[in-house]
Amino acid sequence: MTPKRQRYYSPTQPPSMDMSELVCKTLDHDATDVLIDKWLEHRNDAYWDWFLQVRERRHSALHRLQCGEQLLAWSKGDFVPENIFVRTVDTARLIPLDRTWTTHVYHHRSMQDRKLSMMPVVFTMLPELMLLRGMHDHGCDDVFIIVTDMKRAEMDAVTEYFKFVCQHTFGQTVKPAAEREIYYRHTRLKHTLEHQRRTPCFPQIDLIFRAILYERRPPFIVLFSHQTTSYSQIFFTHPLFVPSDEIFFDFPSGCPNPCCTEDCEMIRFPRRGLDGAAVLPLRRGRARGCFRRVRAREMCNWIDCDVAFTDDAPPAESSDSSSADSAGGKDASTDAAGAQPRPGMRGQVCSKCKLVKYCSAEHQRRDWDEHRRLCVRPAPATPTEKNLEE
């Protein structure tokens, strides 16, 4: 159970979202679709080149089949989200990036008084949000962004503060020494941002940040800064949610200046994996106030199936995807829902691409309309890849 919310603000007690004075602007799925269409229309060459490099990279099929391995694949068609597939970190499904989300943007009321739109905030980091959304099968229908005007050094200090607070307050009683340190850091940040006339003030940032963690439990939260000399920080709530450095090591920094170095970045996307990610050390377990334990599962690739597989034995190969194509005209509603396989199956691997698993041939046929945009035979492994597998 979530601990009882305090009706007063305290840096060491669980806050409530209705205590915040920030303005919340919600962008629904339709608004997200509009932004994605606009982003595709005004194509950014840096991101376009990176996705082309991802398409040309050679990956071993056996390596990609390992449970929990992240994967970004673009096999067929034009550069549109429905043709780019990403493996989810929670269910190991390969799903396209065309799934939208609802964005909740929290900002100071002065931005509303100046009639500033929040659409540019989301548009600035749209590629990153698309990838992070695609990496999660569950729990990412809502994305939370807090807009600030902090500079780089201030953002660094706030990042370390939230790491420390999450380590010592979530799911446990705050020790006196940790409480004193939290109040000291909180007061110092409060005075620093007040002296620089930052908006919103730090207590409001701290309140809404921790309230989102307590009440919504998202996979990540974005602390956005519209300062040109700063960056926007992505806070992850578990190491499993961090993008893999094997895929995103050369991801664009987002800065339009071609002369900038890797340290100049508008959005701090963790291109070096866990080494460069801001992961909140949240306590997990069954105790009161703790976050639920995160356990990666490997599930049937059909999105409406809840069958999880075990890896105690090698999976069997299913029929070729061409057979699913020929059977695609059958009525999908004739599937016997009452005869659904039990969790704990080994699963059947698609015999053509060897990238996804299914619990039955019927679910493979149901998923074929979507999977056909990705399914191709893997290229032969190079000698280097063969040595790595051995």
Image (spheres, rainbow, N blue to C red):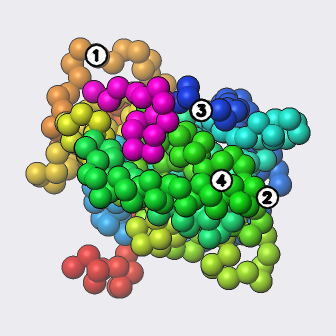
Q: Which mark is residue 20?
A: 3
Residue at left offset 78%, top offset 79%? 258
Disc nearer the start of the sequence (3/4): 3
- Crowd class of label 1 (few under 14; some 14 to 19; many from 20; radius 10 Å): few
* Residue receiving disc 4: 224
For residue 322, what is the image quadrant?
top left
Q: Nearer the viewer, mark 1 or mark 4?
A: 4
Residue at left offset 44%, top offset 68%? 273
Which type of secondary structure does the marked residue at label 4 adopt? strand
The magenta segment = 1-16
Q: Is residue 266 above or below residue 4?
A: below
Q: Nearer the viewer, mark 3 or mark 1?
A: 3
- Callout 3, which amino acid? Ser
Residue at left offset 11%, top offset 51%? 312
* Residue receiving disc 2: 43
| Cα–Cα span, label 2 and label 3 | 37 Å
Disc nearer the start of the sequence (1/4): 4
Disc nearer the start of the sequence (4/2): 2
Disc nearer the start of the sequence (2/3): 3
For residue 198, what is the image quadrant?
bottom right
Give the number of callouts: 4
Where, quadrant-wise, is the C terminus in this rendering?
Answer: bottom left
Which type of secondary structure does the marked residue at label 1 adopt? loop
| Cα–Cα span, label 3 and label 4 | 17 Å
| Cα–Cα span, label 1 and label 2 | 45 Å
